[in-house]
Amino acid sequence: MRTRLLPLLIILMAAVLLALGIPLAVSLAGAQQQKVVVDRIDDTARFAALAQFVTDSPDGATGAFENERLATLSSELRSYYEVYGIRSGVFYRTGTPMAHAPANWSLPMEGEVRDAFAEAKLSRRSHDPKQVWPWQRRNLVVASPVIRDGDVVAVVVTDSPTGQMRSRTLRGWLVIGAGEFAAMLLAVGAALRLTGWVLKPVRVLDATTHDIATGRLKSRVAAAGGPPELQRLARSFNEMADNVEDVLEQQRAFVADASHQLRNPLAALLLRIELLSFELPEGNKEIASVQAEGKRLAQVLDDLLDLALAEHTEADLKMTDIGELAAERLAAWAPTADAKGVRMVADCPPTTAWADPVALSSALDAVIDNAVKFTPENQTVEVSVASRGDTSTVVVTDHGPGLTDEELARVGDRFWRSGRHQNIKGSGLGLSIARALLAAGGGSIAYDRHEPHGLRVTVAVPRSAPTA
C-alpha cells in the first residue's frame, strides 16, 4: 500500500513545486530583461536628447552636415560601443544614418531592428520587446524617437547582446532549481514520515489479521500510533478478536464438556445392555446391533473430545526428523495392515522440519488408518517423505476406491463421509482432527486423486523456524 500511496504524494508535491517554480522562473527572466530594457530606454533617451540639437539634416545630394553637436553625438555613440559592446545609431526617417557606432553598422532592410525603427517612427518607444530566453542567442533591440517640434525627425536604435542577461537568468534559474530540489527532498522526507505514520497501524493490523487467520487467536493489535481513526479501528479490532475468541472458547468448552459428560451415562448404558444380553438368547441380532451402535456413539464422543483438544492445544514445535517419525508410524500400523492383507511400501529418507511430534504422529495415524481401511486386500499403501522448497511432505497413497471431484471438495469436513463408505467403521472426524493438529503448527493437509484409482494425501510441514 505504501508503494501506491507514496508515489501519489510525491507526484502531487512535485506538481505543486513545479506550479510555483515555473512562474517564478518566467518572472525572473522577465525581470532581468525588463531591467535591461529600462537601461536601454534611458540610454536611447539620452542619445535622443543629444540628437535633438542636431538641427541640420542631409538632403539627397550633399550627405550629412558635420557640426559640433553631431561630433559630440558620434563620440558618445563610439564610447558607448567601446565600453558596453552595444551597437547603436541615430537614423533619419529615411533610414540614412545621422551617427552610428561601429562605423560598419547600418540599418538593415528587414528584421527586428528594422521593425523597431518603423515602430519608433510612429512616435512609439520600445517598451515590451519579445522575451529572450537563456537558450536563445539573439540580441535585444530598443528604439526611441527623436522628436522636434512635435514631429519625429530621427530614431535612436540600440542592438544589445544578451549574453550577460541570459547568464544572469540562467544563474537565477539554477538557484530556483536548487531550491526546488531541496524542497522536493524535504517533501519526499515528509511524505515518507507521513505515509509511515498513517500506514504503520495498517501494517500492524494486517499482520495481526493474518496471525488470527492462520490460527494464532491470541494475537492482538499493538498500539502503533497513527491517526485517531486507525487507533479506534485497532481498539475495535481487539475487542472483536476478544469476543470471537471467547465464543470459540465457549464452543470448544461445550464440545469437550458435552463429550466428557456423555461418556459416563453412555458407559453405564452399554454396561446395562451387556447385562441385558445375558438374559437373551445367545446370538440375538437386535442386542448385537444396539451394542454396535453404542460403541460407535462412544467412538464419536471420544473423537469429539480429541477434536476439541486439538483445536485448543498450542503446538510444541521443534526440529523433527519426519522421515524417522513416518517410519515409526508405519511400523505401528504394520500389524493392522498385515491382518487385512494390505502391503505397506515406505520411502522415508531422513528429512527435518519444524513440527510438533505428537500432533504430527496423530495426524499420520489418522491418514494411514484411512488408507489401510479403504485399501482392498492384496493392494498397497505407499508412504514417501520428501522436501520441496520451504516445506517437507509426507505423501500417503492408497489403491482404494478413491473420491470424486465433488467428494474431494468436502473431504476433511466434520462428520462428513462418502455415501459409498457408510458401511465402513468410522465417525468422519479423523481427518478433521488431523487438519486441526497440523494447522496449529503451521502445517497443512491436501487431497488428490491417484490414477487409476485411489487417494493421495499430502501432509506438509514447514522447514523454517516459526516466527514469534
Image (cartoon, helix red, strand yellow):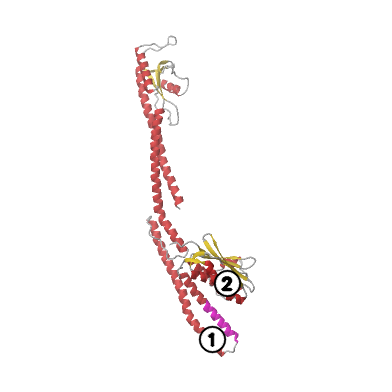
Q: Position of residue 278 (x, y in %)?
A: 55, 89
Foreground residue among 394 and 152: 394
Look at the numbered disc 1 and give the secondary structure of its residue: helix
Decide whether residue 296 is among the magenta residues.
yes
Foreground residue among 164 and 350: 350
Q: Amino acid at mark 1?
A: Glu
What is the quadrant of residue 218 in the picture?
bottom left
Marks 2 and 1 sit apart, C-alpha to C-alpha, by 30 Å
Looking at the image, which residue is at 42% across and 20% down? 121
Looking at the image, which residue is at 45% across and 47% down? 7
Q: Is residue 248 above or below residue 261?
A: above
Q: Is residue 158 above or below residue 189?
A: above
| Lower position in the chain sequence, tag 2 or tag 1 | 1
Q: Position of residue 47 (x, y in %)?
A: 36, 19
Looking at the image, which residue is at 43% across and 47% down? 9
What is the quadrant of residue 11 in the picture?
top left
Highlighted magenta segment, given as a residue range: 283-299
Which residue is disc 2 drawn over? 370
Q: Which mark is residue 38?
A: none
Q: Callout 1: few (<14), some (14-19), or many (20+) C-alpha neighbours within 10 Å?
A: some
> Is residue 128 among what the camera can see?
no
Q: Amino acid at mark 2?
A: Asn
Q: Position of residue 131 (x, y in %)?
A: 42, 30
Q: Left of 157 or right of it: where is 426?
A: right
Which residue is disc 1 drawn over? 274
